[in-house]
């Protein structure tokens, strides 16, 4: 029932090497902005329709010899092969959209459960290609392949309320991508100028949800608003869905699901960056155009992930912060905007923004223990 292969054992005595990264011209690359701005009209329509979600067709992957070779290479570049040789077979894929709190989650699990789990953080296939040099396979294929070769696979996704997610994503590269400028100069801009730019592209950024749209599983009829998480096992893969608004309870939830004593640390917050004051002022002063509010009312993701009361409170909050209608870019205008912004933006930049990068060498393991001890004694993570 699982396609062309059902039982594989991966054996490789070669040392894993670092991925050779592609170097596309004039494209800013960081783990939180890969493929952020591509238009997905299907996702946009789902956001705005009031119909219920349709059941996805579950894919029974069939891997031929050439695909198996690519998947083996992917495992090498993601250091999964090296992890398996070290007798660790529990792998967590934090496979979610950018700006949903995933960086803090990844660092937290690495710090407090690296003795049990190897954690991979990925947003999409572009991230695979640019950061790891992986082509020809999807994230779902890598996940499924690792399940059938005997690894114990967990996949975690996070839901963040849509407007806050859009704002955070917009500010991720507000200077280099959206205004082709420096952070220092952006700080001098009037908020009205930034509001207008954000409203022009509002409909095309930070749409969709991996758990509902991308993962290869049938979703429950509704989110579990009491336990504040979903746990679904499909084809031997354990899928976990969290909400950012419940982050204060992630320690309890993840400690239970992962059978480890997880503590959540704060990591890579936009309001702590150089543009933090501007970001906070934007959130305080921003008014949502009324036509965007009406789209928000019909958002299926809100209907699924928020209880009736939570949804009413969220909509009421934004209804009290509405303004006149705004006509943003058309799809063709946005495509031109994206093309020009990519060409004018800075050259490739690769940032590591994790408190714990996940290295399993003895020195990093020792440093990890010291950091964990400090955090448990009330210490704080040093930024920058």
Image: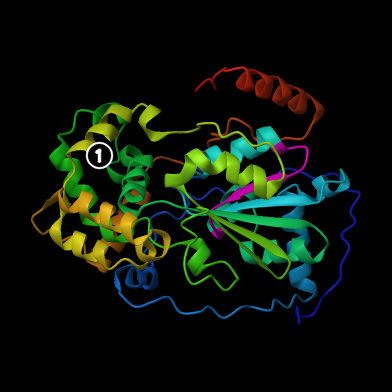
By what rule are the colours in the image chosen?
Answer: rainbow
* The quarter of the displayed image where residue 36 is located: bottom left
Name above or below for residue 148 compared with residue 376: below
Front position in the image: 339 or 235: 235
Q: Whole-percent x and y of residue 19?
A: 69, 47
**Residue at the limit of the structure toward the front, as seen here:** 226
Q: Residue at x 72, y 35 (%)?
A: 359
Q: In this rendering, would 34 be left or right of 107?
A: left
- Circle 1 residue: 283
Q: Which residues are magenta?
A: 113-125
337, above or below 349, in the image: below
Left or right: residue 46 compared with residue 319: right
Q: Residues within 10 Å of mark 1 (few under 14, many from 20)?
A: some
Q: Residue at x 16, y 37 (%)?
A: 191
Classify mark 1: helix, strand or loop.
helix
Residue extending furthest toward the left? 324
How many tags in the picture? 1
Of residues 253 and 200, the one drawn nearer to the viewer in this rendering: 253
């Amino acid at each position: 029932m699982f396609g062309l292969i059902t039982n594989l054992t991966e054996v490789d005595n070669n040392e894993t090497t670092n991925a050779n990264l592609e170097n596309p011209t004039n494209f800013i690359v960081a783990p939180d902005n890969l493929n952020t701005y591509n238009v997905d009209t299907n996702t946009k329509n789902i956001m705005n329709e009031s119909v219920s979600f349709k059941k996805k067709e579950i894919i029974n992957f069939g891997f031929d010899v050439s695909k198996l070779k690519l998947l083996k290479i992917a495992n090498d570049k993601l250091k999964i092969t090296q992890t398996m040789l070290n007798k660790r077979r529990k792998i967590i894929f934090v496979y979610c959209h950018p700006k949903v709190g995933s960086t803090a989650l990844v660092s937290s699990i690495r710090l407090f459960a690296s003795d049990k789990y190897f954690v991979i953080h990925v947003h999409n296939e572009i991230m695979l290609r640019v950061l790891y040099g992986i082509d020809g396979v999807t994230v779902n294929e890598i996940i499924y392949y690792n399940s059938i070769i005997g690894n114990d696979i967990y996949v975690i996704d996070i839901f963040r309320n849509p407007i806050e997610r859009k704002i955070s994503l917009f500010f991720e590269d507000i200077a280099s991508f959206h205004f082709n400028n420096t952070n220092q100069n952006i700080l001098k801009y009037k908020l009205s100028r930034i509001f207008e730019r954000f409203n022009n592209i509002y409909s095309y950024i930070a749409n969709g949800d991996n758990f509902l749209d991308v993962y290869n599983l049938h979703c429950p009829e509704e989110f579990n608003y009491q336990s504040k998480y979903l746990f679904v096992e499909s084809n031997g893969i354990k899928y976990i869905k969290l909400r950012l608004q419940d982050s204060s309870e992630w320690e309890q939830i993840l400690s239970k699901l992962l059978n480890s004593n997880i503590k959540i640390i704060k990591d890579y917050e936009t309001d702590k960056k150089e543009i933090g004051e501007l970001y906070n002022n934007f959130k305080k002063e921003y008014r949502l155009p009324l036509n965007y509010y009406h789209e928000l009312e019909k958002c299926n993701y809100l209907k699924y992930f928020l209880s009736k009361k939570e949804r009413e409170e969220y909509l009421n909050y934004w209804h009290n912060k509405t303004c006149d209608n705004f006509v943003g870019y058309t799809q063709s205008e946005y495509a031109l905007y994206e093309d020009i912004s990519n060409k004018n933006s800075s050259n490739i930049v690769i940032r590591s923004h994790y408190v714990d990068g996940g290295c399993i060498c003895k020195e990093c393991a020792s440093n990890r223990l010291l950091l964990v001890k400090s955090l448990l004694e009330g210490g704080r993570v040093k930024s920058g």
